[in-house]
Image (cartoon, coloured by chain):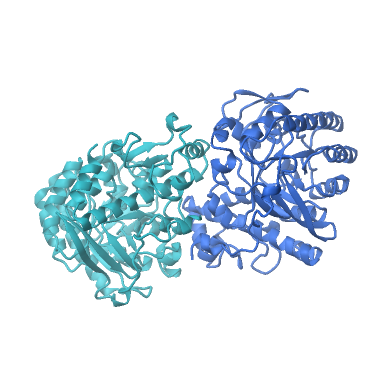
Chain colours: A blue, B cyan
Amino acid sequence: MTQSDHHQNRPHAAAPLASTHELTSERPLAFEVTARSGGARAGVLRTPHGAVQTPAFVAVGTQASVKSASPDVVKDTGTQLLFANTYHLYLRPGADLVARHGGLHRFMRWQGPIFTDSGGFQVFSLGASIDHGVGKVASIFPGEEPQSNLRRQSGSGMVKVREEGVEFKSHIDGSKHWFTPEKSIQIQRQLGADIVLAFDECTSPLHDEAYTRASLERTHRWAKRSYEEFMRTGALHGYPQALYGIVQGGAFRDQRLESAAVIGGMPFHGVAIGGNLGSTHQEMYDILDWTVPQLPEPLPRHLLGIGDVPGIFEAVARGVDTFDCVAPTRNARTATIMIRQSDDGRPAPRFRLNLRGKAFETDMRPLEVGCDCYTCTNFTRSYVRHLFRAGENLGPQLATIHNLRFMARLMDDIRSAIQRGTFDELRRVTLAG
Amino acid sequence: MTQSDHHQNRPHAAAPLASTHELTSERPLAFEVTARSGGARAGVLRTPHGAVQTPAFVAVGTQASVKSASPDVVKDTGTQLLFANTYHLYLRPGADLVARHGGLHRFMRWQGPIFTDSGGFQVFSLGASIDHGVGKVASIFPGEEPQSNLRRQSGSGMVKVREEGVEFKSHIDGSKHWFTPEKSIQIQRQLGADIVLAFDECTSPLHDEAYTRASLERTHRWAKRSYEEFMRTGALHGYPQALYGIVQGGAFRDQRLESAAVIGGMPFHGVAIGGNLGSTHQEMYDILDWTVPQLPEPLPRHLLGIGDVPGIFEAVARGVDTFDCVAPTRNARTATIMIRQSDDGRPAPRFRLNLRGKAFETDMRPLEVGCDCYTCTNFTRSYVRHLFRAGENLGPQLATIHNLRFMARLMDDIRSAIQRGTFDELRRVTLAG
């Protein structure tokens, strides 16, 4: 059985594009909630490149490539949609080149839906967050690796924020660049993702209340400018694009409430929750508790940069529909394998095992017992560990397949549980570590 | 269309194992010549893991992994068989661990036939060749990258040759090890390849005639000891193994003639031509002209470490059946793409292009126009170049798929031409650079 044949009959593959032809520039996205279980909801998000069953995990392909996995391999894991990076693609290879290919889908040969962020997070994560010595992810989950780009650069002066926009230096060659809300939207028109994000400022957990307030108000003005530029420009590649606004406001309750009302009150096609999500899991849950109830019920909700198992369960419980995070693919490259249960049948600590451990040297089991991915149905822990120790690229490749499949299966189970009304039970059983 | 579906109907896939059940420890291999065109021959080599259409290129999976390609991906390129490395696998992860999996096929999940070398080449390439500052490949093809392990280590004292065997230091941690013909065979029994090689000494082009002569005679005694150990021991994994002898003798005519007679006169199941193959392409052709006519006609003939296009054509013309070489996969990792024709329709210089060139930045063509591989049917040169420039692992992965498919298509065309009696014409047209 080949890698592709293996999963061809999966029920969770993106549904046929029955209603894609109904999507227009006025209605570039169709979202329907089909089931609820407490605050959690399951639904279908239709885009010009197919329908996504939600809640869904969005795999990250920063530079128009999911690291170590071809588009066919990504698809075979049950991954439904991707997240690509405006900042990185603008710097390299340049949005013109992507546009010349007819947009990201054709450039990277991903047939499913794609998100692009606005570049805001990267512009600031290479600036202020570094000045503070912290990154968004690092601050939320102590012990996690911060995003590599947060580590690569240091020192101040990388970013200058003005009302008009942001001046920043390339992390590649130090060259100076200038992003405005208008420019971010123009670049995202060239890139051609199904869903694009408004340009925002992403504050750091160490920004004080006053700075965060000033930044928030600027972000709201930028949201309006992003929307106006989006309306002024048209889609370039023959299918419509949708625009999400981004709620900011740091860990400050009044700012989050206000931002949810302002962004939720604008005619966006969906809402993303971004920025500094607090310093602990609980703070992130508080932020969601403040924010989500303020958002318009019919709009799809995306939580930016979160992909750990408890975080996903708690956010789904609070009504979030989609998530993106580099962790599954980044972890894979360091032999960190995502699993739900340890070998003793109990929830695995942090839902992972590090395959480099000596204990796995002669372990003949698959990476995760019971997993149906190409890696787990073919190879032993012992073999994959050998690949990592020997420096073979196939190690990260096989681990990436498993971790993406892990996320897809997790989201499948979450959706099924919502449909059956047993989501809280699944959450309890899964998280009872 | 998925990567696997894409090639499922390929006519050149390994034939069904109709006669595998006839293979026994007395007859572990069946080779039949089915067509001739001048000195070139086409045939079928049956092994316990399937039949190989010859002439065939053997892809290298040194550490039980074809670098950057999963077994399914390798199979989809039309690659029929693999070559793994006794020296490397003995050091890491150890032959015991491979045996515990039931042999290499199960360890690495490659269902087709596998060769293992005896470890001789690596033991010596980490010793004497380095003392001489040259490697086998580097010396034959000026400008080629030498094998990386030839560069990593330097200085003398890595290897001590005695009649009994060879003492060497691990390139990984400097630990001391001892290989004898007996031990090499025992390890290869554990690894469980379909075809294993006798233990030999691989001399360097800078060894003089006297040293090469003494070495040759020792290699002949080692061939006898390898054969005796092979007969004394049995296969461990439930299917028989075949043993090839190795012809040595450097670039010295009388020594090659003698070695072909001695090795060809022993009851091996096939013959490999190894060692120092001269300092120019012409010297290698001379060596083949001396050697091949001395070999028993019914035995399959393998040329060790050669995989460039002219070398393959000239060796096939002289009656060689199989080839292994790291070049296609190694080149892929440096964005060196194998092609037959340049964009002007003429044979490409050295049958390659380097995708990093600025000229390919906006090149919307596939890596090789007309190629049917997953990479060429999906991606542009522009995109794959972007992957290499951005440091994405998918770049080497996609280039590896193409280069392996290039080799498979080349060998397909060579076989067809032999069957049609037009091999010389294909050689002339292909090489008329």
Rendered view: A38 above or below A106: below
**Residue at 73%, 40% in the rendered image:** A136
**Residue at 49%, 53% in the rendered image:** A394
Q: Image quadrant for the C terminus of chain B?
A: top left
User: Residue B38 location in percent, x, y?
Assistant: 14, 54
Residue A316 quadrant: bottom right
User: Residue A77 location in percent, x, y?
Assistant: 59, 57
Q: Residue furthest left?
A: B254
**Residue at 51%, 60% in the rendered image:** A3
Q: Is residue A400 visible?
A: no
User: Residue B405 location in percent, x, y?
Assistant: 38, 51
Q: Residue furthest right?
A: A254
Give whichever of B422, B115 is nearer the camera. B422
Q: Is residue B26 visible?
A: yes
How many numbered discs? 0
Residue B39 quadrant: bottom left
Rendered view: A63 above or below A411: above
Give whichever of B134, A278 is nearer the camera. A278
Give whichever of A236, A110 is nearer the camera. A236
Residue A257 quadrant: top right
